[in-house]
């Protein structure tokens, strides 16, 4: 399994846990093309590289909630509580796992997390900006970021933006219509 990992593949593995975006150890292993036990061995053999906040061990309640949401045979067969890597933990893991696929996977993960942070900042700026011109510009930027995250192999056929202001509420709707490009 020696292939470049796409934004989409990484984005679909990111879950929200304890107010952090994380990727489960089994998903990290799949992305890197190794067994989950290799990921956990790297973690066990290098504890100094993973301080608090870099890796989260799920508790039983989190594990049960996650299993009810994700129906993966691998998750249900595991006898130990899984670990979830934060963005920082993934960076550290990348310093340990050395292979061409690990490098490509790390690049895809870094790019995906970066795009998600950029989107978050843009949305925050959008809601804080009173200027209509700046809102339109930020709306376009957020649409471009979302388009990057959703699919690189699709062409934009149409976009539509509407802004609805209510006394204490800003509602933004941005629609992007996409089609797969013909090869």
Image: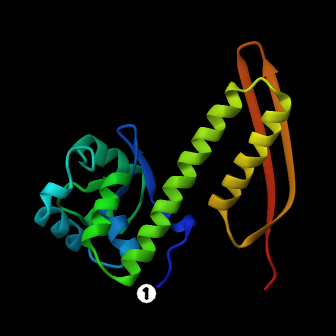
Which quadrant of the structure image shows residue 24? bottom left
Relative to 72, say whether 85 is above or below: above
Quadrant of the snapshot with the C terminus: bottom right
Q: Relative to 61, is 179 on the left or the right?
A: right
* Picture residue at 69% right of the left edge, 28% below the top: 127
Q: Relative to 57, is 150 on the left or the right?
A: right
Q: Is residue 12 visible?
A: no
Question: Horizontal and vertical percent for residue 26?
Answer: 32, 66
Is the image coloured rainbow, by chain, by secondary structure, or in one colour? rainbow
Which quadrant of the structure image shows residue 174? top right
Q: Which residue is mark 1?
A: 2
Relative to 69, say whether 97 is above or below: below
Which quadrant of the structure image shows residue 32? bottom left
Q: Relative to 11, is 74 on the left or the right?
A: left
Question: Horizontal and vertical percent for residue 10?
Answer: 49, 64
* Picture residue at 50% right of the left edge, 74% below the top: 5
Question: Horizontal and vertical percent for residue 59?
Answer: 22, 44
Q: How many marks?
A: 1
Q: Secondary structure at mark 1?
A: loop
Camera-nearest residue between 76 and 32:
32
Question: Horizontal and vertical percent for residue 99?
Answer: 33, 82
Q: Relative to 162, is 15 on the left or the right?
A: left
* Picture residue at 32% right of the left edge, 68% below the top: 94
* Picture residue at 40% right of the left edge, 75% below the top: 103
Q: Is residue 72 visible?
A: yes
Camera-nearest residue between 150 and 122:
122
């Amino acid at each position: 399994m020696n292939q470049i990992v796409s934004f989409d593949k990484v984005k679909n593995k990111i879950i929200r846990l304890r107010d952090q975006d994380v990727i489960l150890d089994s998903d990290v292993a799949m992305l890197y093309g190794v067994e989950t036990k290799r990921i956990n061995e790297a973690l066990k053999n290098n504890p100094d590289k993973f301080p608090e906040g870099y890796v989260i061990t799920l508790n039983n309640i989190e594990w049960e909630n996650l299993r009810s949401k994700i129906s993966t045979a691998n998750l249900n067969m595991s006898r130990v509580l899984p670990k979830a890597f934060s963005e920082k933990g993934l960076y550290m893991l990348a310093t340990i796992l050395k292979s061409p696929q690990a490098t490509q996977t790390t690049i895809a993960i870094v790019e995906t997390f970066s795009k998600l942070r950029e989107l978050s900042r843009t949305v925050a700026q959008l809601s804080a900006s009173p200027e209509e011109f700046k809102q339109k510009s930020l709306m376009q930027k957020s649409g471009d970021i979302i388009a990057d995250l959703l699919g690189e192999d699709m062409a934009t056929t149409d976009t539509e933006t509407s802004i609805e202001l209510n006394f204490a509420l800003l509602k933004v709707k941005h629609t992007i219509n996409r089609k797969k490009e013909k090869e």
